[in-house]
Image (cartoon, rainbow, N blue to C red):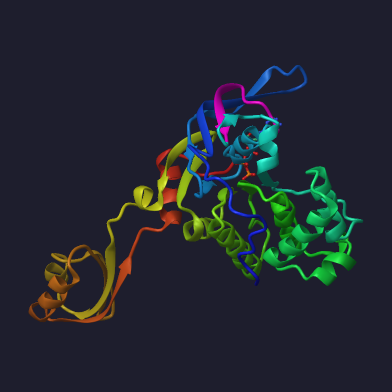
Amino acid sequence: MVVSTPIAEAKEPIQGHVVETWEISKTYRTGFWMNQKVESLKPLSIAVQPGETFGLLGPNGAGKTTLLKILLGVIRASGGRGTLLGKPIGDRQTKQRVGYLPENAYFYDFLTAWEFLDYIGSLFQIGKRERQRRIMAMCDLVGLAQKTAKKKQLRQYSKGMLQRVGMAQALINDPEVVFLDEPMSGLDPLGRYQVREIILSLKEQGKTIFFNSHILADVEQICDRIAILARGELLCSGSLAEVLGTDEGYQVILRGGQVEELSKYLGNLSQEQDVWHGDYQGDPQTLVDALPSLGASLISLNLARPSLEDYFIRQLRERGITTSQ
Ligand SMILES: Nc1ncnc2c1ncn2[C@@H]1O[C@H](COP(=O)(O)OP(=O)(O)OP(=O)(O)O)[C@@H](O)[C@H]1O
């Protein structure tokens, strides 16, 4: 995969937050008489720094797409306010500096990828020569063969290839901030890996990335900071270290010893024949030194950090959320 193809010279660093909201909220009115209310987003305040990869997580129906659409000016907030690149949300000039990959991108599938990207480039009023240059750079960036891009109609593309075209269209205007709604959904492991690589290469170029996802393993690998939404409510936000904590423990497997003695050192002890599994907190050397007196020998000792998935599920359970909406 080809990565890191900057398509424009360095810009002035962005001052202040790229995204900032203050108590922003959304209530939809539904029903025949529009008399039913759906509170999709409860008052929410977040801030995203320049150059950051920010992951917005949450189960289905949490309000992730709603927030993204508000930030992009696609729908209006019911309350609160926010800024994008320092300008009030909805500012027309800001749109030139923003890229967006919708969750279910609609493509004119009778066009080739090249024609489609050329069309999107023309909407941004990019001149013909520059459009050609950018389309070539985009094909390289997202790993799309130029020959295929010129020949094949989009209706003949696989989901993974369409996602690459979607990424390319989101980047054709060389945006400073890119919003990606579920960029890995529906992709196989290779496709997910490739999208992750593209996101990392954008990050290297200093772009700010805001993306929605419920694929936690991907988020854990690429995000600087995360926020968790559920039922329209912000449950927490912060860096992974802030959210998960830095308390690292060890998973220990050893042979021999008695439960009374071993439990002074290990938590969650379980036994399979004469092999013990347990958790250990503290200096590993202390445990290793104590093993002879416990009559036990070490089989393995592995560093274990709580995963984002464990944390995410715990957060939802603590609030009694066991199903998606
Ligand atoms: N146009 C609409 N009219 C009424 N309710 C809506 C509308 N759009 C979204 N909702 C409701 O708002 C809530 C949040 O929806 P949203 O699409 O923002 O969730 P999401 O977190 O993006 O979910 P998913 O992960 O499934 O894409 C849901 O309960 C949804 O049914």
Q: Is residue 130 above or below residue 210?
A: below
- The answer to whether residue 238 is left or right of residue 35 is left
- The answer to whether residue 127 is left or right of residue 180 is right
Q: Observer-nearest residue: 124 or 325?
A: 124
The answer, for residue 252, to whether it is visible in the render is yes
Residue 279 falls inside the magenta stretch: no
Q: Which percent across, then down, holds residue 114?
A: 84, 60
User: Which residue appears farthest toward the right when viewing the image?
Assistant: 110
- The answer to whether residue 312 is left or right of residue 111 is left
Quadrant of image for the C terminus:
top right
Q: How many marks?
A: 0
Q: Observer-nearest residue: 48 or 188?
A: 48
Q: Which percent across, then down, holds residue 294?
A: 11, 77
* Residue interval drawn in magenta: 74-84
Which residue is at 71% across, 67% downward?
Answer: 140
Name the quadrant where ligand 1 sits. top right
User: Which residue appears farthest toward the left when viewing the image?
Assistant: 293
Q: Observer-nearest residue: 221 or 116?
A: 116
Q: Quadrant of residue 196?
A: bottom right
Which residue is at 76% across, 64% downward?
Answer: 136
- The answer to whether residue 58 is left or right of residue 267 is right
Q: Observer-nearest residue: 133 or 320?
A: 133
The answer, for residue 270, to whether it is visible in the render is no
Residue 76 falls inside the magenta stretch: yes
Q: Which percent across, then down, holds residue 35?
A: 69, 17
Quadrant of image for the N terminus:
bottom right
Q: Is residue 209 above or below residue 218?
A: above
Q: Quadrant of residue 159?
A: bottom right
